Amino acid sequence: MFRKRILQIAQLSSVGVAGYYVGQYKGKANENESIVVHGKAVKNMPGLPIFGTVSAAAPYTDSGAPKDRVSQIMKYGFPSLDNVRSYDDFVLSYDRRNRVPNWVFEHLTKAHVAKNDQVDRSKCDFHPDESIHPFFRSQNSDYKGSGFDRGHMAAAGNHRLAQKHVEQTFFLTNMAPQVGEGFNRHAWNKLEKHVRKLTKVYDNVYCCTGPLYLPRREADGKSYVRYQVIGANTVAVPTHFYKVVVCEGPGGALDMEAYVMPNQKIPDETPVSSFMVPPETIERAAGLLFFDKVHRSKLHTINGKKV
DNA sequence: TTTAGTGT
């Protein structure tokens, strides 16, 4: 059934994701499995930042090496630490290589998405984010004439509590090139509205959004990841976008939904639900773990199905 | 309604 959904997406996008995931989505979430870190078995506990930058940067002393060895090796600086940026109403990780976000995180409630006459989207302008090094910063000129929209990852309509909040969603750090007609302005917008509507049912909605670069089988039978880049700063045009949401009901019950949509014109009648995929699929493709602190067994449903 | 780009 999941495979069928992926196939639908693959057909829609002519992107061969199907073979990529077959037999894999059941493989995750074995919480009792031990993981070897620094030659020691470590229990795979949700929320333990085994793979995080923090642990990579922390000195490891069990080998008898000098405590400050890491700081000696890295004397002149780490090439990157996660490039996380926190704004007033959303948080993102910026992909300096592709000049688009890795992921953007939002917390939505009824109040955050409610209509607010004090907030005017039309007063907002797209701005380059000066906190990003100029080598990696995307500019409005990169998008101009490209044929692609500056597509919000954290949607402007999700941040209506204050004018300042909606304005911050217009930083180019929150943008990725999206097909406008039939995608950003239609199918993707429909998905964003669906997520906003979840706040009518749930007290809290946690939403993670980002790009994907999925491999596709080409004429020679081999798979390649191929994507366009635009502008002087070679901003990557993702092949797909994902959205993973966790919804918290009144009793603390958790439901998860996960979507992947191809960055292309999508027929208007296509239901949002046809883009549902197992969250593991996105995690494997993106190299990210979503809602790692939530034990998957605490989830009542994933994509509307009992776990 | 919300998502934007282009032309003025």
Image (cartoon, coloured by chain):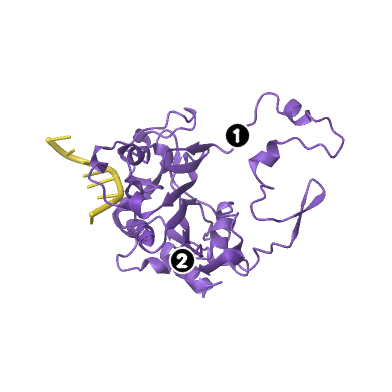
Chain colours: A purple, B yellow
Q: Residue at x 52, y 55 (%)?
A: A214
Residue of label 1: A80
- Are the residues tagged 1 and 2 within 8 Å (C-beta)? no
Which mark is first along the chain, 2 or 1? 1
Q: Secondary structure beneath disc 2? A: loop
Which chain's residue wears label 2? Answer: A
Q: Position of residue A268 (x, y in %)?
A: 29, 65
Query: Is A226 on the left or on the right of A45, as rendered?
Result: left
Residue that extends furthest to the right in the rendered view of this protein: A64
Residue of label 2: A276
Quick one: label 2, few (<14), some, or many (20+) residues within 10 Å?
Answer: many
> What separation in Å lies between label 1 and label 2 (alpha carbons)?
33 Å
Q: How many marks?
A: 2
Q: Nearer the viewer, residue A145 or A247?
A: A247
Residue that extends furthest to the front in the rendered view of this protein: A251
Residue type for callout 2? Met
Q: Position of residue A198 (x, y in %)?
A: 38, 61
The quarter of the rendered structure image containing the C terminus of chain A is bottom right
Q: Residue at x 42, y 38 (%)?
A: A88
A117 vs A243: above or below: above
Q: Is residue A162 something one can see in this rendering?
A: yes
Q: Residue at x 58, y 51 (%)?
A: A288
Q: Residue at x 48, y 68 (%)?
A: A303
Q: Secondary structure beneath disc 1? A: loop
Residue that extends furthest to the top in the rendered view of this protein: A76
Residue type for callout 1? Ser
Q: Nearer the viewer, residue A107 or A144?
A: A107
